Image (cartoon, rainbow, N blue to C red):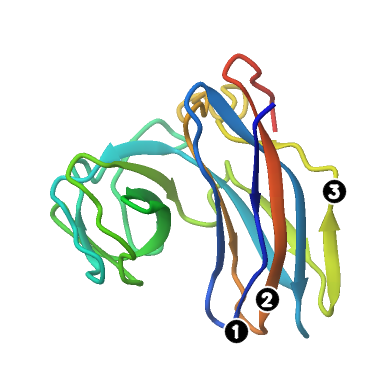
Amino acid sequence: MPTFHDGYQTQSAGVHVKSIAPGLAGHIPRLTNLNYRSAGTAHTLYVMKCCGVTAAGEEASSGQTTLEFDDTSPLITSAGATETLDANDWVVYQTVAGPESNDIATVTGNAIVFNDNIGAVVEKGAPIWVFGELTRAVHTSLEALASQDNLYSDLMIQGGIAGNSDPYQARIGAGEPLLIISDNSTAPGFLKSVSGVYVPDWDVNVN
């Protein structure tokens, strides 16, 4: 069974700690293990599931903050209405160096301005996976206690959204990434490891 793993990283207080479980064609990512330490204050970790997909309307260079989207309304609300992207929504876009996450600062027409620079070239037509806001109901939150290692060794958080939890946003999750974010708001955070497996696209679970 294919696996994914992301190693150690840290950020100072107020800077998000981010990790991506990349998508794999024909498979769904399943997060099974996470090790996180927060220094001094508790942090909230969010395991975010892709809620919609669009593509880059134009090429974007490394170092810029603006990316043209083909569609800025790829989301569906829990009431079944079309939802336009907004500030603080999270996305993952495919660069020539691999997938990269960013959160939105502003939306003007089809131009999305991010809070951080784009790290590598995003080619026209590159896929963009949309996750929405951190607290979206379909995501999973984990509380990381202060000043200790928080070991989550028996997780089973899988990509995709089960129809019995939200029929309007239901999706299998095959080929889509998972996004792990720490709010890291009041003290440095240390993401020591993230790992999991890819399951076949017929192995859909409810989580």
Q: Which residue is mark 3?
A: 153
Q: Position of residue 139 (x, y in %)?
A: 59, 46
Q: Residues within 10 Å of mark 2 (few under 14, many from 20)?
A: many
Disc 2 versus disc 1: distance between alpha carbons? 7 Å
Where 40 sits versus 148, above or below? below
Q: Secondary structure at mark 2?
A: strand
84 relative position to 145: left or right: left
Circle 3: element type? loop
Image quadrant assignment for residue 55? top left
Going from N to C along the chain, the mark reached first, 3 or 1, is: 1
Instruction: Pick the quarter of the image with the C terminus.
Output: top right
* Residue at the (25%, 57%) spot, across then down: 121
The amino acid type of the residue labelled 1 equals Ala
Say which of 16 and 43 sits in front. 16
Q: CA distance from mark 3 to mark 1?
A: 25 Å
Determine the residue positioned at 45% across, 27% down: 168
Indicate the quadrant containing the N terminus: top left, top right, bottom left or bottom right. Answer: top right
Callout 3: 10 Å neighbours few (<14), some, many (20+)?
few
Q: Which residue is mark 1?
A: 13
First in sequence: mark 2 or mark 1? Answer: 1
User: Residue 153 placed where, x, y %?
Assistant: 85, 48
- Residue 206 locus on image (x, y percent): 69, 27
The residue under label 2 is 189
Q: Is residue 120 left or right of residue 159?
A: left
